[in-house]
Image (spheres, coloured by chain):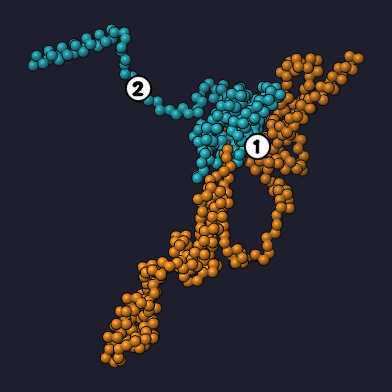
Chain colours: A cyan, B orange
Amino acid sequence: MAASLSSAGTVRLLSALARSSLLCSSSGLRGLHVTAACCKNRAARIRIGKGNKPLTYEQALHPHHIGHRKGWLSQHTSNLKGEDGAADRTVEDVFIRRFMFGTFHGFLANEIVLKRRGNVLIVCAIMLQKMLPQKFYFLIGYSESLLSHLYKCPVKLEIQTLVDKAVYKYI
Amino acid sequence: MASRTTKALLSLGRINIPALGLNNAVSRVTYATALSVNSSSSKKGAPERNGRGFGSRKPRREAEGPRTEKMPVDQDWTAVYPAATPFRPGSVPLPVRMGYPVKGGVPPEKKGNLELIKIPNFLHLTPAAIKKHCEALKPFCTEWPSALDTDAKCDEHFPIKVECTDYVSSGLSVRNPSARIVQLKVKLSVLNLDDHARKKMLKLVGERYCKDTDVLTITTDSCPLRQQNYDYAQYLLTVLYHESWKTEAWEAEKTVADMEEYSWEGSPSQKNIMDLLLRMNVAGEGEGEEVREQLLGRSEVQEYKDSVTRLKNEGDNEGSVLQYKEAVKKVFNL
């Protein structure tokens, strides 16, 4: 009994020594952090701030409101039953959004709305009046012709301009 | 003189600007502005000056309000929205609001409202616009022939019906491979077929014939083009008709198993009942062919023949089984 007690004591001592030696060594120590996972949904959500950040309707409503309080930004028939070409249309959509975002950098008041009617691709955008109209016209013509050549289909741009963004609420 | 030159330049400048506007007149129709674009001209002065060189006068137009303010009540709406275009708040004189309201507020207004642009609108399809479309299409239309006023007459004069489908979708290509399928429907009663031809035709087409409606359906999709499939379907119909009229040498080897329907003459049922009746009557009359003929002539035997044929062709339903029972009872005088 005395022997076992002493052995337990030596084990504890040894472990204490080991821990202290580990703590002493500067490198090679990696602790395991165990905290509760924060399973919050962060998709397309702008977190609440102090109340001075303006949000448009698109930004204010979260993705789960699509179909209930929000419409769809892109419309085509490929997602219907028995139709194909959904992946192609999606890739085109992504490219056109990036293209418009880059060509009219800083001028877009809101998201781009894409509509397809048969062969024609209609890109609807709301822009701010920060540029000379001649420059606007040039960029619009440039986008139309470039996209038409890229996709081999007629591409039309429908632009509306605003003085400043339409604010829905302040976060 | 200085004033005159400046005035001349002024007029020159004013001519130029409308010209610029005119060049883009078409595009101005599509690029609607909630407020006129020239309202941003406060920054325009400086670069314009460099371009023109005479900076005292600025080719500025005042910011006009949206077009809705100048629309008369009795205007021609088909001119405002002649074709399907997205919603333009400056062109639609309605105080439309769309969207989920903020707490304690109202839905957002139409100016800068993306929701109104997202949805398809039918502003180009007012009843007046549709009337105009109809009027424009009328010269190209012809009257339906007055003699074909009932379905029966249409079937009588045009017994072959061809069905093809066109597909419309949004995408880079107008073509759809399913558009090549052609379906040809015809009633066999219309074709001039005798008994042998009809049986042979039914054997040739197999599944394509519907017995309830007596309609033969030929569906062709093996060719890449619709015209080719249509020609192939017509060719198939012609070939089937001619082949079913021909009698080949090997058709004489048709066995009982190939027969489409049951025939009583020469069947085991006939043999059985003949033997039975002969044995029943063996005491009375003599043997021979005349006895057989007599027996066959008897009405009970005919009834029995009808009932067995009906049972074998139609299957076991209540009527046929009852008929068989009655016939058997009569034959045995029960």
Residue sticking out furthest to the front: B249
Residue B218 x/y as whole percent: 51, 58
Disc 1 from disc 2: Cα separation: 51 Å
Residue B230 x/y as whole percent: 56, 54
Question: Which chain does the numbered disc 1 sit on?
Answer: B
Q: Residue at x 61, y 26 (%)?
A: A108
Q: Quadrant of residue B231?
A: bottom right
Residue A159 x/y as whole percent: 66, 30
Q: Secondary structure at mark 1?
A: loop
Rendered image: mark on residue A40: none
Q: Secondary structure at mark 2?
A: loop
Q: Residue at x 64, y 32 (%)?
A: A157
Question: Which chain does the numbered disc 2 sit on?
Answer: A
Work out whether B11 lies above or below B155.
above
Residues A41 and B105: in front is A41
Binning the other alpha carbons within 10 Å of mark 1 as few (below 14), some (14 to 19) or many (20 upward) gives: many
Q: Quadrant of residue B190?
A: bottom right
Residue B320 x/y as whole percent: 38, 74
In the rendered structure, which amino acid carries the disc numbered 1? Phe
Binning the other alpha carbons within 10 Å of mark 2 as few (below 14), some (14 to 19) or many (20 upward) gives: few
Q: Is residue A86 visible?
A: yes
Label 1 vs label 2, nearer the camera: 1
Rendered image: mark on residue B87: 1
Residues B13 and B262: in front is B262
Q: Is residue B334 visible?
A: no
Residue that carries the numbered disc 2 in the rendered image: A35
Q: Is residue A23 left or right of residue A119?
A: left
